Amino acid sequence: MDRATRLRAQVSAHSTELLVALLAGITGVAGSYAVAGYTRQFIVAPIDALVVRLTPGRLVAFVIENIGEEGHLLHIALSVGLAVGLLGAIALLGIRVADRLTQSTLGIVLAGGLAWGVTAAITADPSLAIGAAAPVLVFTALGVQAGDAIEHNPARRRVIASAAAFIGVAAGVGRLANAGGNDAPTDPVSEAVADRLQQADTQALDIDGDVPGLVSEIGEFYNVDIAEFDPEVPADDWSMTITGEVGDDVTVSYDELTAMPTEHRYVTLRCVGEDLNGEKMDTAVWTGTPIKPLLEEADPGGGCGCAMLRAEDDYFVQFPVEALEDAFLAWEMNGQPLPQSHGHPVRVLVPGHWGETNVKWLSEIELLDEEMDGYWEQRGWHGTGPVNTVAKLWSTTTLDSGAIELAGHAYAGTRGIERVEVSTDGGSTWQDAELSEPLPGDDVWRQWRHEFDPDGSHEVVVRAVDGEGTVQPEERSDSYPSGATGWVRQTVNMMGASG
């Protein structure tokens, strides 16, 4: 064999090894998905959590402002790539060991065992780690046996293609099995919650356009988290501790918490990272108990009058103790146990504060001696201040009469909404919109509606006046770092279209 032929053979062999390693990585990730589903035991989940923690705050803010909700796909794609690369590198190591030491069994066993050990260490679940390890072992064996002949052997190429297809199908079947197993039955709604849901339905305005009611459906309630994979915390295993600068540590279990005096509150949440007229603002009927008695039992101290709330997903946020005294520990949402994505089994609701600060999967409240930055403060956002007043324009509809109906929601946290004003001439003149009757509670939105007869193109502007008589600021700002502000403006023509 001449030198050129040997060189081509070496290149072919290396290409084959890399191809097999890549397929090992891909099918290893698919195998993990097949057995674990889209949970924290999926190999990608812990890697994604690490990527999120290490991403600089300025980059996070840039993605939120310029990409929005779909930005999470970027870190998921990166995390999948890292997982594929890790498992592929393990397979490649096994192939090279087998080649260099001429010990096929050693290389195969090394790759399979290492893939299992690394996956088990990353996911902390040895039993499910086999889902990633088995494909790596199989493809390492194929790579070792095939050598440089695989490029010229259609039968072996078919074996690799069939194995990849098999793992892909297994992943799909496994995911369907996991999805079906996670469907929770719907519990009967208590009479008290049913009354509140009925009250919200009765007080909602008669709006022709597509505007949410006064209580949002659970499946449509917006959801934002620091990572893609939610913690799985069984209610029987949950407890929350108040610790730090306290007279006595206080620990409460789920059964103890739910045995405390129960309330059903309307509470609105708004995302600090949404744009001015975004739709990440919703309301539910939350069932829970006030946190104040637990704080009093702990006898809070410390030099700053502040506390750090910590969650099972490693999220943390600081609050003034004074704000926490009005907070609420919730375990139901619209009469159903909190969904996993909304903090099952227990989350906190702090009146009038941005949605991100209402910690889900709450595990600890630590009273501090001096102030500390929370998760988002470390990334450049501005603390836990009250939400900004906003009137949203969510619908422009041409009615049968030819009039145009404008509609949306307005929210100002605990300040409440006194009125919503609408201008159809760019802000030169204003008229009061029709408002829904306020629901009971200190932290609830209101619907608004306004009709006008169009005579061409109109620049529509909406603004809210809060319960203290303060008009929503006109000057626009982006969501970073303190939440979006400004008046919502849209151009509306005679057909009701806006832009």
Image (spheres, rainbow, N blue to C red):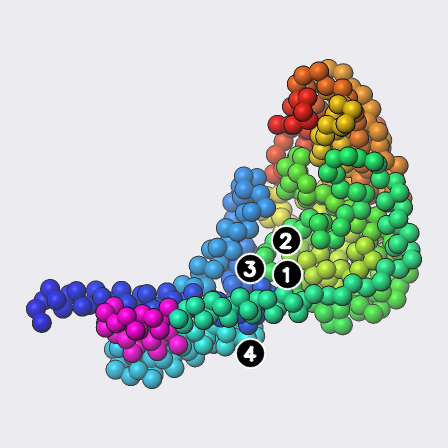
Which of 476 and 248 lies nearest the eye of the viewer?
476
Residue found farthest to the left: 2
Q: Residues within 10 Å of mark 2 (few under 14, many from 20)?
A: some
Helix, strand or loop under label 4: helix
Question: How far, Cα to Cα, is label 2 from label 3?
Answer: 11 Å
Going by the numbered disc 4, the residue's amino acid type is Ser
Q: Give the residue number, with chain letter if any, for mark 1.
A: 230
Residue contact at pointers 2 and 1, CB within 8 angstroms: yes
Please tell me which residue lies in front, 53 or 337.
337
Q: Are marks 2 and 3 in contact (CB under 8 Å)?
A: no
Mark with earlier residue (2, 1): 2
User: What residue is shown with label 2?
Assistant: 225
Name which of mark 2 and mark 3 comes first in the sequence: 3
Viewer-side label of 1, 3: 1
Of the residues tagged 4 and 3, which is closer to the observer?
4
Q: Quadrant of residue 180?
A: bottom right
> From the viewer's perspective, is 392 left or right of 107?
right
Look at the picture and state if 448 lies above or below 162: above
Q: State the residue position of label 3.
A: 49
Distance in Å between CA atoms under marks 2 and 1: 8 Å
**Whole-number angstrom distance, CA of label 4 to CA of label 1:** 20 Å
Where is residue 307? Give x, y as percent. Answer: 74, 54
Does the CB distance between marks 1 and 3 fall below 8 Å? Answer: no
Neighbours of disc 3 within 10 Å: few (<14), some (14-19), many (20+):
many
Query: Which image quarter holds the C terminus?
Result: top right
What separation in Å lies between label 4 and label 3 (alpha carbons)?
A: 21 Å
Q: Over which residues does the magenta segment extend?
A: 138-161
* Residue appearing at x 68%, y 43% in the figure: 280
